[in-house]
Amino acid sequence: MIQESEVAVVGNEDIATVLDGICTMFLGSNATFADPYDAQPGQHYVTGCVSISGEWEGAVTLGCTLAFARDMAAAMFDLSPDDLEMDEVRDAVGEVTNMAGGNIKALLPGPSQLSIPSVADGIETAISVPGGTVINQVGLDCQGHNLVVTVYRGNTLHRQPRAV
Amino acid sequence: MKALVVDDSRAIRMILTKLLRERGFETVEAGNGVEALERLENIGEPDVMLVDWNMPEMNGIDLIRAVRKQCEFRTVAVMMVTTEAELEQMGRALAAGANEYVMKPFSAEMIVEKLELLGLVPA
């Protein structure tokens, strides 16, 4: 299900276009709309988060399976997915989240600043943004993998995302 | 030709370093602005610096301002490579002393086109 809140100031189509550009650039494959995945028992997920502070305050998270994160990292580091260290996978997801957040920030009222990305990963791990309200949640499919971009609005300044 | 690549993402440093080496550049990397200033003390003036904006310890804008304050680095070409996509941010970077501006995600062609504009690779 693709959700777009009535208070959203950026459209799901715009978010999909941003992610499609990133996936096309690094993986050579399009990202198309899909239902956001539901956490599967025992599955390893990786989620990146950047905060936006200033005229518009909130956060952008990007979540995906470890398999997709490895494919993205392999493309960026020009290595086989099996040869990657977990730090390299986190670095790649952090940078992709940074790109998504920066390009989404450009669609929001400004001026605002983007934080350094943070990344959480683990079995059945998700990120919550305390005080934030979900205004967009976009599920995408790229190379058969699901990824989910969520835009939160709220006073998240100086708050760290929390793994739950 | 010598290039200094400054980005807190190892993946981005690796992509840019590979691209530059394939075009004959000798490259040095730094993970933030503070590290970049330390590298500059050791390597002297590079021909070009590729600089990210959002980095820990010292961001790209503060790095460019610090570099432009030093006489020996006033002529180095600076290309900002960043996720900051607003026109106002581009203006800030150029005012700080950047010569070119590339938004992430970037293609190899985009970087090469900017290197051509800077006269660092043949057009």
Image (cartoon, rainbow, N blue to C red):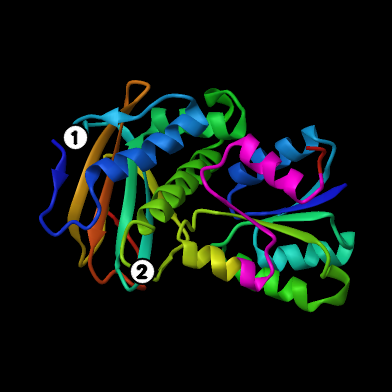
Q: How many marks?
A: 2
- Taking the image as shown, residue B54 lies to the left or right of residue B50, namely left
Q: How far separated are the C-alphas under marks 2 and 1?
A: 33 Å
Return the x and y of residue B5 as percentages of the image width and height: 71, 52
Residue B111 belongs to the span the image colors magenta: yes
- Tell me which chain the residue with mark 1 is part of: A
Which sits in the foreground, B76 or A154?
B76
Q: Residues within 10 Å of mark 2 (few under 14, many from 20)?
A: some
Residue positioned 68% across, 69% down in the render:
B63
Residue A98, x across and y down, in percent: 45, 52
Residue identifier under label 1: A38
Pointer 2 and pointer 1: residues touching (CB < 8 Å)? no
Asked if marks 2 and 1 fall on the same chain, the answer is: yes
Chain identity of mark 2? A
The answer to whether residue B80 is above or below residue B114 is below
Badge 1 marks a residue whose secondary structure is: loop
Residue B87 appears in the figure: yes
Q: Residue at x 63, y 72 (%)?
A: B95
Does residue A43 show up magenta in the picture?
Answer: no
Q: Residue at x 28, y 33 (%)?
A: A140
Which image quarter: residue B38?
A: bottom right
Three-letter amino acid code of the residue under disc 2:
Gly
In-front residue for pair A66/B31: B31
- Identified by mark 1, the residue type is Asp
| Figure quadrant of residue B90 | bottom right
Q: Position of residue A25 (x, y in %)?
A: 50, 33
Q: Which residue is mark 2?
A: A110
Residue depicted at 84% across the width and 54% down the height: B47
Residues shaded magenta? B94-120
Query: x%, y% of residue B106?
Result: 56, 41
* Number of residues whose C-alpha sits closer than 10 Å to that of mark 1, classed few (under 14), some (14–19) or many (20 or more): few
Helix, strand or loop for disc 2 = loop
